Image: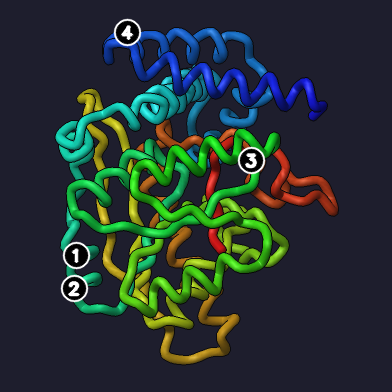
Amino acid sequence: MSGAGDRLTDTLYGLGWSTVKTLPEPVAAGLGRSIADVTWKRRGTSVLRLEANLARVVPDAGPERLAELSRAGMRSYLRYWMESFRLPAWSEQRRRTGFDPEDVHHLTDGLASGKGVVLALPHLANWDLAGAWVTTALGVPFATVAERLRPESLYDRFVAYRESLGMEVLPHTGGTAFGRLARRLREGGLVCLVADRDLSASGVDVDFFGEKARMPAGPAALAQQTGALLLPVILWYDESPVLRGRVHPPVEVPAEGTRAEKTAAMTQALADVFAAGIADHPEDWHMLQRLWLSDLDPGRDPAPGARPGGESSA
């Protein structure tokens, strides 16, 4: 992207944060739906990629059903952005009531044990809102990892935004994230990672909806190295203004095998939970990039095209 393009991108996101958060909530929600519908009707690259991905998730869906899903998917995606632009202006009470998760005892019991907890999520619904709920309702700070963006000023905006919600944000690049996350876990802390798409060359190949995809090794490797619990989390929207979610039981570390074999088995277990959650809520899976290995050009780095503000494992 050119310098002018970088500045334009940063300006547009800045306008989103400064303008959308001042709108009444029904107006912001309506604006998001309108933008989503216009984007969907244009049938651009992102919409076509979303439909191609959803075709794997719902293999018996015909063209009409896929079009319905992709339209609902774009509305869900814009709901994420409208909520995220507004989150810093939400009251503490609004953050507490904006998310209604099930089986949170897996998280609270894990933290009470002092072992540390890794929460691993796919790109479903609004993980920023779920994170704000954790820091507000539970009063638990956590560390996460964010992809470096261009321009740098846009990355700084996302870091400042997430830090304002109580998150410690580490850059994906630079080689220090894994060690710092491991220290937080050894101290009994919490780490949250969006982990259904690998942004490095060190990912793990998994079976995902019947095809090979690559997911990050970080969550499983951190759990092995530190003794922390690895908990998959699924998020979704329904017709209410409240985000829904479920914390799943811990992914066990296999008793036998090399470290690499254990990491592969645990990452596959995560992929299986993710797949079940995505199949239940396909319209809330915000995967607008290539994911499956068969869709990637030979030698292509899977990182290009990552969504602004996207996270990765260490």
Residue that appears at 43% across and 43% down: 162
Q: Which residue does the image show at 24% across and 63% down from the upper left?
A: 107
Q: Along the polypeptide, which appears first: circle 1 or circle 4?
A: 4
Tag in front: 4 or 3:
4
The x, y position of residue 169, in whole percent, is 48, 53
Which label's residue is closer to the chain start, 2 or 3? 2
Q: Residues within 10 Å of mark 3 (few under 14, many from 20)?
A: some
Secondary structure at badge 4 equals: helix
- Residue drawn at point x = 63 percent, y = 30 percent: 49
Residue situated furthest right in the rendering:
299
Which numbered marker is on residue 112?
2
Write down the residue under mark 1. Answer: 108
Q: CA distance from mark 2 to mark 3?
A: 35 Å
**Residue hosting label 4:** 27
Q: Residues within 10 Å of mark 2 (few under 14, many from 20)?
A: few
Q: CA distance from mark 1 to mark 4?
A: 36 Å
Find disc 3 in the rendering and name its residue: 306
Closer to the N terminus: mark 4 or mark 3?
4
Type of amino acid under label 2: Ala
The amino acid type found where label 4 is placed reads: Val
The answer to whether any part of residue 65 appears in the image is: no
State the quadrant of the N terminus.
Answer: top right
Which badge, 4 or 2, comes first in the chain's sequence? 4
Give yes or no for contact between labels 4 and 3 (Cβ–Cβ under 8 Å).
Answer: no
Q: Position of residue 143 (x, y in %)?
A: 42, 59
Figure check: 109 above or below 37: below
Task: Indicate left or right for 174 with 246 as reference.
Answer: right
Q: Eyeballing the image, is 28 above or below 104?
A: above
Query: Mark 3 touching mark 1, by CB under 8 A?
Result: no
